[in-house]
Each structure stands twice: as structure tokens, then as C-alpha cells.
Image: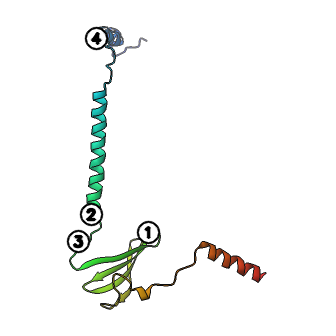
Amino acid sequence: MRLRFPVNVTVMSGIASLPTAVLATAPAATPAAQVGLSQFAQVFGALVLVLVLIVGLALSAQRLRLGRGTNGRHLRIVDALALGTRERLLLVDVAGERVLLGVAGGRIERLHVLPPGAASAEPAAAETPAPTPGFPGILAAVLGTRKNGR
């Protein structure tokens, strides 16, 4: 029994010789062109232009507060405090009334409602809390209690 191939052998030999035929007709490689100072300055200038454009757009987006959504007429975020990576406290002014909101993991809860005029945007000098002790004071207090406790 004789095997028959659907492809003609002459076609296969023509396909096999194709890369050598293409290489024979390819033009000779020219030596690489030297990069001059003017080309370097042009590329460097384009890079500086792109960086200045990025910084300018970032500053304008920050100035316009894009992405914060604070353009409302009746709502205004007075203060925000990040408690963790996804948790934060927001003090929101709603038509003259201050509302303390807790935002965490896709949930928003009203924690407290302050009457109008109860809390100002800037705390008064008399309301400033006592300074908290720094790390050395806390460490001394903890070590002191351990020594006295033992």
C-alpha cells in the first residue's frame, strides 16, 4: 500500500528555499548612524515637556479637587480623619447642621448629629487639649509600673 501526501514535493522544496531567496535579494545593511547632540537634546526636551505636563495636570486636578465630589451646594466635607486603610470619619456640613459619619467597607453610618453652631471649623484656643506625652514619657510610665508591680 502506497501513502499519498496531499502536498506536492516541488511545492515543499520551493517553500524551504524561500528564506534564502529573500536574504539574497535584501539590500546590504548600512552602518548605524551616529546619535548627535541635537538628537539627544530633542529627546531630552520632549521628556522634560511630558514631565512638566504630568505635574501641571496633577496640580490642576488637586486645585480643582477632581475626584472628591465637593462641588455640592448643600453638602460640604468639613474634616476627614483616616482611621485605617478603608475606615474614616467624616464631619459633613448639611444645610448648617454638622453630621459625624463613619465610613468603612462600603458602609456609611451616622454616628452623631451636632446642632447648628455647636462645632466651628477651627477649635478655640481654650478648647485645645492638654499635650499628650511623647514616646519617652509613655515608655517611662510603662517601665515604672512594671518595676513597681513586681
Give the image location of residue 60, x and y in percent: 25, 59
Q: Between residue 65 and residue 139, name the one nearer to us.
A: 139
CA distance separating discs 3 and 1: 23 Å
Asked if the residue at tag 3 contacts the one at tag 2, i.e. Cβ–Cβ closer than 8 Å, the answer is no
The answer to the question of whether label 4 and label 1 lie on touching residues, with beta carbons closer than 8 A, is: no
Q: Nearer the viewer, mark 2 or mark 3?
A: 2
Instruction: Determine the CA span between mark 4 and mark 3.
Output: 64 Å
Asked whether disc 4 touches disc 3, contact meaning CB atoms under 8 Å apart, the reply is: no
Three-letter amino acid code at the position of disc 2: Arg
Q: Position of residue 133 (x, y in %)?
A: 57, 78
Q: Which mark is residue 27?
A: 4
Secondary structure at numbered mark 1: loop
Q: Is residue 147 above or below residue 43?
A: below
Marks 1 and 2, how far apart at CA: 24 Å
Q: What whole-number distance in Å separates the C-alpha atoms at marks 4 and 1?
A: 62 Å
The Cα–Cα distance between marks 4 and 2, rounded to whole angstroms, is 57 Å
User: Which residue in the protein does label 1 denote?
Assistant: 86
Q: Earlier in the sequence, mark 1 or mark 2?
A: 2
Label 3: which secondary element: loop
- Sequence-first tag of 2 and 3: 2
Mark 4 or 3: in front is: 3
Vertical placement of residue 61 versus 54, above or below: below
- Place residue 117 in its image quadrant: bottom left
Number of numbered discs overlaid on the protein picture: 4
User: For mark 3, what is the residue?
Assistant: 71
| Residue type pointed to by label 3 | Asn
